[in-house]
Amino acid sequence: MSVNSADIPPDGKNAGPRIKILHEPCAKEPFAVIVKPRGLPSAPLRQGDDSAYTQAARLYPILDEVQGRKAVEHGLLHRLDTDTEGLLLLAADQDFHDAMLAFQADGKFIKTYTADCQIEPDCTRRLGGFPANDAGIKLETLLTCMHKYTVSSEFRFFGPGRKSVRPVTGGGNSYADRKASGTVYSTRILTEQTGPGTVRATCVISAGFRHQVRCHLAWLGLPVRGDRIYNPVCGQGDFLHFWASGMEFPDPAGSGKLSFRMDVPA
């Protein structure tokens, strides 16, 4: 079922972007899947702040009964950056929440992202802080057919306020190695050229670090269009062309896998 943003009860003070509902909580499937719009935070900083979670909880107060990793987030099982549009999963009962945390730890919560990228071979040199890209990306391959590859690295926070991240490959800069996450994160990427100097990338992860997909794409010389953090030639006024477009996870009731997708603009 899809619930339009107009169906969400207003709270009397927030009139910003509104969520849409792809899946409503029910007894058999006690969770909600929502589409978070661009410009709306995933979670409130304080109780009552406008956010994707807050709007969903006004529709389904049962969400507030779940005890999450942070009290104010209740059953919110993952986050998206404010500038990212896409799917969020929210638990409507404690058993489902706890089961999903176990699935996440086992790499069974699979997320798909879609990105419109620019081909910028000089990207990492202009941004700074990136290790050499040994995987390489052959532009001629991108120009002739769809190309699939996997990019893996640890990560470290980078820059003022730790607002961005950088890949760490080990065996390189000792300072970077000391600051590394200690866990290797992989992004499976399928690319298809969409125009002169542009590529659409479909990216799949089973474990995530902050900005993982966007950083890995920039590392390959494919920064996301409109990405003010990882695209050194980002156009003024352009929005982030990056969508959390799919998710898949085991059905805690034991009936196979559940998957959800959203439409992404051509």
Image (cartoon, grey):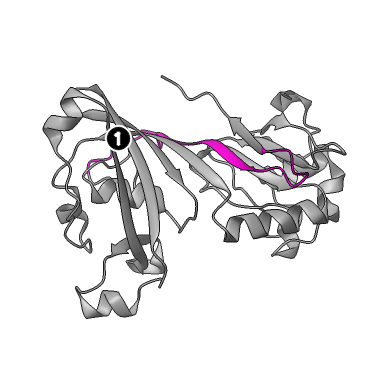
- For label 1, the crowd category at 10 Å Cα-Cα, with few meaning under 14, some 14 to 19 and many 20 or more, is many
Residues in magenta? 233-256
What residue is rendered at 33% in x and 56% in y? 152
Identify the image quadrant of residue 260.
top right
Towards the viewer: 178 or 46:
178
Towards the viewer: 54 or 121:
121
At mark 1, the secondary structure is strand
Towards the viewer: 216 or 74:
216
Q: Is residue 193 above or below residue 155?
A: above
Q: Main secondary structure of the magenta part?
A: loop
Q: Is residue 81 above or below residue 19?
A: below
Indicate the position of residue 200 as horizontal and vertical percent values: 33, 29
What residue is rendered at 18% in x and 40% in y? 120
What residue is rendered at 83% in x and 40% in y? 60
What residue does disc 1 label? 117
In the image, residue 198 lies in the stretch drawn in magenta: no
On the rendered structure, is 225 left or right of 242? left
Q: Residue 195, can we see it?
A: yes
Position of the C terminus by quadrant: top left
Indicate the position of residue 73 as horizontal and vertical percent values: 71, 57
